[in-house]
Amino acid sequence: MSEQPTRRDVLGYAVRGTGVVALGGAAAFLATRAAAEGAWTIDPTKCINIRLGLTGVDACALCASECVVPLSAIRAVNDYAKCGRCCICPAYYDVTSEVGSDGLPMRKLCPRDAIERTAIGEVDPDDPLNNFYEYIIDEDKCNGCGDCVMACKEPAGLGSIKLEVRNDLCLDCNRCAIAQACPDDAILREVKETT
Amino acid sequence: MEYARIRVIGGGGPDKPLFDAALRDIVARPTGGLIVVGDSVIKLVDDAGRVERQWSTEHPGYCAAVDAKGTIWVGEPGQIETFNPKGERQATWRDPDRFGLVTAIGFAGEFVLIADAQDRCIRRFDASHKWLNDIGNDNNTKGFAIPNGYLDFNVDDKGIIHAISSGKHRIERYSLEGKMVGRFGHFGQRKPADFPGCCNPTNMTLSREGLTIVTEKAGPRMKVFDKSDKLLGFVGSDAFDENCKNMPVAVDARGQIYVGDTVKRVIVVFAPQPSESGKTTETKPTTTQGAGTP
């Protein structure tokens, strides 16, 4: 013999059902908005760290300092198809520092030591310049300060390192703090086309 | 030695570029005047800086050279075209396997030397275009280190090849058989003779007197080294657009140096000035308008 639901049970079902519907509706609303408005992105033609034609200036570090995410949702990304595997990479080394006995600059450029330099193949012990090197950015360290991006930019480098918004880290704020602070309006919400 | 900027060779008007998109090479003709390579066009410029003749190439030209017979060789992606001084095509030498991107051509006696920037080596051929050997790829980098994408070289009167390995910040010297017989240059940002940045120098030429003249990028400069590889003089970045890279350079029999400003697409001309100070100075340039042959 089944028991009849009590008045309390009925009220509980009703409240839970309403909550589920409300949550589903909010999720659907947010998903619809996200699909309609896209995601935050960097316009490489505006960002002074990336755009060509601006050299000899300090990198803008607002992407690192303004993001509400503790380590910033912006990272430097190396495009290996463009990277020259330079022996003396200006994004890795502070090329203005003293040169050591091995012929290489003595200081690194990245303030967080986020770039790893690895020789490709065997190193020539008599000629350290006689090698190509791979440069890997450690995303757990990089905060998107842009120093390496500015240093790698053409014509000094090959422009293989760019800044990108990591959408898996970005909180997708309605009013992105970096976009508010960026003097060049380089942080944009990429609009997706809807059908 | 001081080098004074004496004029700028433009095209068709004051400070107008010689080419629409790209200026890639300059060659001082043995008979006087210049051969200038850019876009898909060859321009012959006279001593006064006027374009006296121009013609089109099949593909974009990256370099030129003049052989002992006066034939003009033009290096292009995948091929070399040869022209007589009137601009009439003589032949097209295609070798897709060995001519990825031809950025320099030289001659040593009967041999033809071709720089393939794609495969990062210099290829030696005999007079019948038979391949003999490659030069500069017997090393850890399997070729010249040229992140800037341009391989430049010259051959001296003893048959020694002087080639730039910009990523190693030096000029390497090779025998025709491919043995390295010397090198000079090193990385640095603090002394004028240093080669800074990721990859410098980028382009070079040799004078009749044995001077080595190089150009650099970021910031753009021109430097002159004597026979013992000692810095003789230099011209700083103020003479060129700061975004120039891979600036072609040529020197004529008078010692005048021609450097291509690859952003403004004009040629900046420098002349040596006797000096005891050892400083480098520049004079206010004048612009020579090219005749702009249609």
Image (spheres, helix red, strand yellow):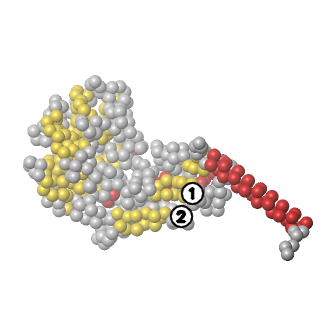
Left or right: A89 as drawn, with respect to B166 = right
Q: Which residue in the structure is indicated by mark 1?
A: A166
Q: Is residue B36 visible?
A: no
State if disc 1 and disc 2 touch (CB < 8 Å): yes
Tag 2: residue type?
Answer: Glu
Q: Earlier in the sequence, mark 2 or mark 1?
A: 2
Left or right: B129 as drawn, with respect to B2 = left
Q: Is residue A132 visible?
A: yes
Residue positioned 47% across, 47% down in the render: A55
The subunit letter for the residue under badge 1 reads: A
Q: In which quarter of the image is the C terminus of chain A?
A: top right
Where residue B140 appears, as percent x and y from the top left, is 28, 66
Work out whether A101 lies above or below A43: below
CA distance separating discs 2 and 1:
10 Å
Q: How crowded is mark 1: few (under 14 residues within 10 Å), some or many (20 or more)?
A: some
Nearer the viewer's eye, disc 2 or disc 1?
A: 1
* Residue B238 occupies quadrant: top left
Where residue A53 appears, as percent x and y from the top left, is 46, 43
SS category of the residue bearing label 1: loop
Number of marks? 2
Tag 1: residue type?
Answer: Arg
Checking the image for residue A139, the label placed there is 2
Q: Quadrant of the N terminus of chain A?
A: bottom right
Residue positioned 20% across, 43% down in the render: B80
